[in-house]
Image: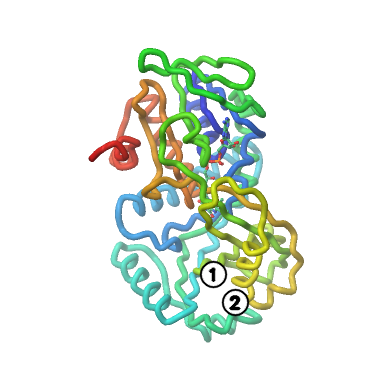
Amino acid sequence: MKGIIIGGGIIGLSIARELQKAGYTITVIDRQRVGRGSSWAAGGMLAPQSEGLEPGVFLDFCLESRQMYPSFVEELERETDMSVGYWKSGIFCPAYSEEEEEELKRKLETYKSMGLSGNWIDRETLEGRYPSIGREIRGGVFYPDDGQVDNRLLMLALERYARYRGIELVEFNPVKKVVVNGGKFKGVRTATGLVEGDFCIITAGAWSSEFINLPVFPIKGEMAAISSKPKDMDTVFFGSKVYLIPKKDRKRIVVGATEEKVGFAEGNTVKGILQLFTGLRDTLPYLVEKNLLETWYGYRPATDDLLPILGKTQVESLFVATGHYRNGILLAPITAKLISQLIDKGITDRYLEQFSVFRFREG
Ligand SMILES: Cc1cc2nc3c(=O)[nH]c(=O)nc-3n(C[C@H](O)[C@H](O)[C@H](O)COP(=O)(O)OP(=O)(O)OC[C@H]3O[C@@H](n4cnc5c(N)ncnc54)[C@H](O)[C@@H]3O)c2cc1C
């Protein structure tokens, strides 16, 4: 059976890998080099608790994927002989005001009642740990089970996996149209012609609504990276003003991220970068001495209810896995598993039901 995957981001390549393992012949088509969309732009946090998700199906989904990460990464590293910078660094969420302190403490109690870990760290302790701390910071919550991965290395590893294992990568070839015949998927029309297959999965991130009527749209995020030394930081800071992600090589701290609904507006803006570095200065002021290494931006694939869209569509043999918004790096392992099980064995479950595209057509 031949499957076509439109979009070689973390979602497309992770699904391709699972289906290849299950014996399918897979072609991934991308309009640029694979792995250079949102998945390249991301911060790489694996942060269901630090994101402050409320209890419910989506939090469960995120927690399950976080749990899958160590084995997902370990297996991929073995297969590709590459390291992808997975680091269970823990994530610290600073409170910049009394209201934030109350809210963070409420969430902490909720998570503890669910058996999840976390603890409050007061300002005095932080002052003993860091050369300087933003004046407004009152303390914060530390979530030891949240962590991070180097998403760029992860994309390179997934690309290497695909190239080693015979997954066909058709790059720099935009898909123009999904071709349907009698309600059944037939093929995709690309810039260079028709590619036929037995089934297709749309994993084109923020661009997914180009091929099918889906409520998917981009939320732009601007980012920066600064130089770092190992002693500068050893855990992620994730607050309402900024997040600071020291990468495992300890040479870089990623500073993120703005959130704007401005379509596919290009470029870094002065106001975006100003917001990031004001947030950095208000959090760990000593970092303003560091060198600026890079700025970039990307587009989170958002949906009307900010939840992913996964599984079957109205067209037979046409599937979708998109809309992962702020958590696509985190959600790659579970998405790949569920979509490949659905295609290979017809297995469906509560997540696929909850995140089905058909939820938008009801009522
Ligand atoms: C600034 C920022 C920070 C983020 N931080 C985090 C984080 O810390 N943790 C986390 O879990 N998530 C984070 N995210 C979210 C995460 O990056 C996304 O949810 C995830 O990368 C989505 O993956 P994807 O494979 O669906 O999309 P993408 O990686 O965007 O891949 C889609 C692919 O489809 C291709 N494509 C598009 N149109 C076509 C076409 N016509 N024909 C062929 N191919 C096409 C694109 O070229 C691209 O390669 C962040 C996102 C941003 C922007």
Q: Position of residue 146 (x, y in %)?
A: 48, 60
Q: Position of residue 64 (x, y in %)?
A: 39, 49
> What is the image's colouring?
rainbow
Q: Nearer the viewer, residue 270 or 256?
A: 270
Q: Position of residue 270 (x, y in %)?
A: 67, 63
Instruction: Count neighbours of disc 2 (C-alpha within 10 A) and say few if under 14, some if 14 to 19, many if 20 or more.
Output: some
Q: Position of residue 7 (x, y in %)?
A: 55, 33
SS of the residue at dot 1? loop
Number of on-image labels: 2
Q: Nearer the viewer, residue 288 or 46?
A: 288
In the rendered view, does 246 fall on the left or right side of 12? right
The kind of residue tagged 1 is Lys
Give the mark nearer the N terminus: 2 vs 1.
1
Indicate which quadrant contains ligand 1.
Answer: top right
The residue that appears at 30% across and 62% down in the rendered structure is 114
The residue that appears at 57% across and 54% down in the rendered structure is 221
Location of residue 229 with respect to 55 vertically, above or below? below
Q: Nearer the viewer, residue 18 or 361?
A: 361
Label ID, residue 188: none
Instruction: Count neighbours of disc 1 (C-alpha within 10 A) and say few if under 14, some if 14 to 19, many if 20 or more.
Output: many
User: In the rendered image, which residue does mark 1 sit on?
Assistant: 241
Location of residue 351 with respect to 164 vertically, above or below? below
User: In the rendered image, which residue does mark 2 sit on?
Assistant: 282
SS of the residue at dot 2? loop
The residue that appears at 25% across and 38% down in the rendered structure is 362
Q: Nearer the viewer, residue 83 or 357?
A: 357
Label 1 beta carbon less than 8 Å to ligand 1: no
The kind of residue tagged 2 is Asp
Location of residue 337 with respect to 146 vertically, above or below? above
Using the numbered discs, state the Cα–Cα distance from disc 2 to disc 1 in whole angstroms. Answer: 8 Å
Does the residue at mark 2 contact the one at mark 1 (Cβ under 8 Å)? yes
Quadrant of the rendering where the C terminus is positioned: top left
